[in-house]
Image: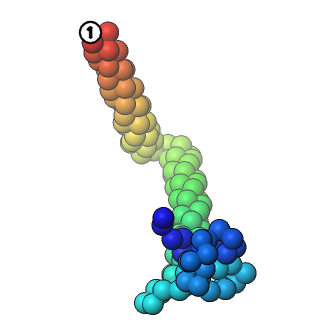
Amino acid sequence: MALKVMVDSLDDVSEGGRDLYEAHEGKYRLKLEGLEDTGALKRAKDHEKESRKAAEVEAESLREELAAIRNDNEATKDADAKKNGDIEALDKSWGSKLAKREQELQGQIDSLNGYLRSTLIDREAVRLA
């Protein structure tokens, strides 16, 4: 029979093992030498976990804000180029936007094609098996 480190009641422990337990925070804890209280470490880990989540949320918010600022900046540049009749700057701006969007779409196409290929191959392998 294995001993539990923490029990709610001494009724859960055989009579011979009851003297191995001591009352601790409304429960009974196994008396062990050299056993460190890991509660502080666990609380520190939980605190760091919450801090990381908060930092990730803030980072995502800042990324969105930066993207909005970049879009506004590009729109301002485009508006200025239109106002000044700078066709070359407009062409360059739209060319870079088009290339960026093409890369995004090509990535999606490649991903979907890979999924389709693996699905078809798996289905054929199952059929042959």
Residue plotted at (48% across, 66% down): 2
Position of residue 11 measured from the top left corner of the image (x, y, whole percent):
69, 71
Q: Looking at the image, which is closer to me, 24 or 84?
A: 24
Direction front: furthest residue: 16
Q: How many marks?
A: 1
Residue plotted at (26% across, 9% down): 128
Q: Which residue is mark 1?
A: 128
Position of residue 10 measured from the top left corner of the image (x, y, whole percent):
67, 75
Position of residue 31 measured from the top left corner of the image (x, y, whole percent):
53, 86
Q: Looking at the image, which is closer to me, 129 or 103?
A: 129
Q: Residues within 10 Å of mark 1 (few under 14, many from 20)?
A: few
* Residue 39 shows in this picture: no
Give the quadrant of residue 42: bottom right
Q: Amino acid at mark 1?
A: Leu
Q: Secondary structure at mark 1?
A: helix
> Is 80 placed left or right of 88 in the picture?
right
